[in-house]
């Protein structure tokens, strides 16, 4: 009898799991989170259509974007040499026989910019590389052979890649994550691609090293001012304007809590213990990075306070 009951429980458990999985998959496809994954999709890599002529490629926990234009593919951030091998496959599966028109670095950090050598090996050694002029300076100074230098530099005024099929506006919004950050805005698709300074329901990187949090919020607000319905990220699956609004609210709340702690004369360690912001417990990396985010916000606000007292 016990064996029969156990078997029935196992059956209903498996049945329930299958139903939940089916619901999740149905939601994912119907909501446009992905339209098609590569045949070689696995834990490491996949690609999916996010808008007309526009695709997201994922390698591990990194994401990037490639766009099909009338003259060829515009491929953003190749990520790494290993990731780029999969990136090539994704581009060829998504847009068979397409040529690669250009590679765009969103910024100079090598965990996003590496891999262009692989794309050039497969699509043409003279494929142009577009980046902010400050990205060029940083990469030239580093001398990293795995990251070929940009061949076309973009100023703070930005650059429009004119295309009747899919125009792309490269915009410079300010200095937060780095001083060299470009975002992509696709007006026809009402889509934005933004890397690192805004993510999908995730904590900031560790203790926010070198980040001006006020400028970070300002940049996020400038993204919000654009006319878009979909935003693709360098980390996390695509979202909408509500996702960006939540990021802004998170950092604003973080700064408010840090100011309150300073007003109560709490030390940094005391602030870390007292500030929890439980509303964000389900966000990515809360357990690993939230306390570090508090430290970064505390130091940021304390530095401003110290300067104003001088």
Image (cartoon, rainbow, N blue to C red):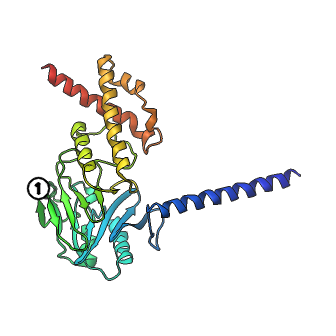
Residue at image location 22% in from the left, 44% down from the top = 176
Residue neighbourhood size for the residue with mark 1, other residues' Cα within 10 Å, grouped as few (<14), some (14–19), many (≥20): few
Residue behind mark 1: 157
Which residue of the protein is positioned furthest toward the right in this rendering? 1
User: What residue is at 28 percent from the left and 77 percent from the top?
Assistant: 122
Judge from the rendering whether residue 100 lies leftward or rightward of residue 55; answer left or right: left
Tell which of 28 and 305 is nearer to you.
28
Which residue is nearer to you in this view: 168 or 12?
A: 168
The image position of residue 194, as x and y in percent, is 28, 54
Give the residue at x 27% y 72%.
119
Horizontal side of 179 relative to 24 (left or right) equals left
Where on the picture, by quarter, is residue 236? bottom left
Relative to 251, is 121 above or below? Answer: below
Which corner quadrant of the image does residue 264 belong to?
top left
In the rendered image, the quadrant that contains the C terminus is top left
The residue lying furthest to the bottom in this view is: 97
Task: Say which quarter of the image contains residue 44.
Answer: bottom left
Q: Residue at x 24, y 40 (%)?
A: 211
């Amino acid at each position: 009898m016990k064996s029969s009951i156990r078997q029935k429980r196992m059956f209903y458990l498996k049945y329930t799991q299958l139903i939940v999985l089916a619901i999740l998959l149905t939601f994912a496809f119907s909501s446009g989170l992905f339209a098609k994954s590569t045949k070689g999709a696995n834990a490491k890599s996949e690609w999916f259509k996010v808008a007309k002529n526009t695709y997201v490629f994922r390698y591990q926990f990194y994401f990037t974007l490639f766009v099909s234009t009338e003259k060829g593919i515009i491929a953003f951030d190749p990520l790494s040499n290993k990731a780029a091998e999969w990136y090539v496959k994704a581009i060829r599966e998504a847009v068979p026989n397409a040529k690669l028109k250009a590679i765009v670095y969103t910024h100079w950090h090598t965990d996003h910019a590496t891999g262009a050598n692989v794309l050039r090996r497969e699509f043409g050694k003279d494929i142009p590389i577009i980046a902010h002029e400050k990205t060029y300076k940083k990469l030239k100074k580093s001398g990293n052979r795995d990251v070929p230098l940009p061949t076309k530099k973009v100023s703070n005024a930005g650059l429009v890649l004119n295309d009747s099929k899919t125009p792309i506006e490269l915009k410079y919004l300010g200095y937060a994550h780095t001083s060299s950050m470009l975002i992509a805005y696709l007006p026809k698709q009402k889509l934005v691609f933004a890397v690192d300074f805004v993510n999908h329901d995730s904590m900031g990187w560790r203790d926010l090293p070198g980040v001006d949090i006020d400028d970070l919020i300002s940049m996020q607000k400038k993204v919000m001012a654009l006319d878009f319905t979909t935003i693709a990220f360098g980390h996390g699956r695509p979202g909408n304007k509500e996702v960006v609004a939540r990021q802004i609210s998170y950092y604003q709340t973080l700064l408010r809590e840090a100011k309150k702690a300073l007003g109560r004369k709490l030390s940094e360690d005391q602030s870390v213990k007292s500030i929890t912001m439980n509303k964000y417990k389900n966000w990515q990396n809360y357990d690993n990075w939230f306390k570090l985010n508090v430290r970064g916000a505390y130091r940021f606000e304390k530095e401003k306070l110290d300067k104003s007292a001088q």
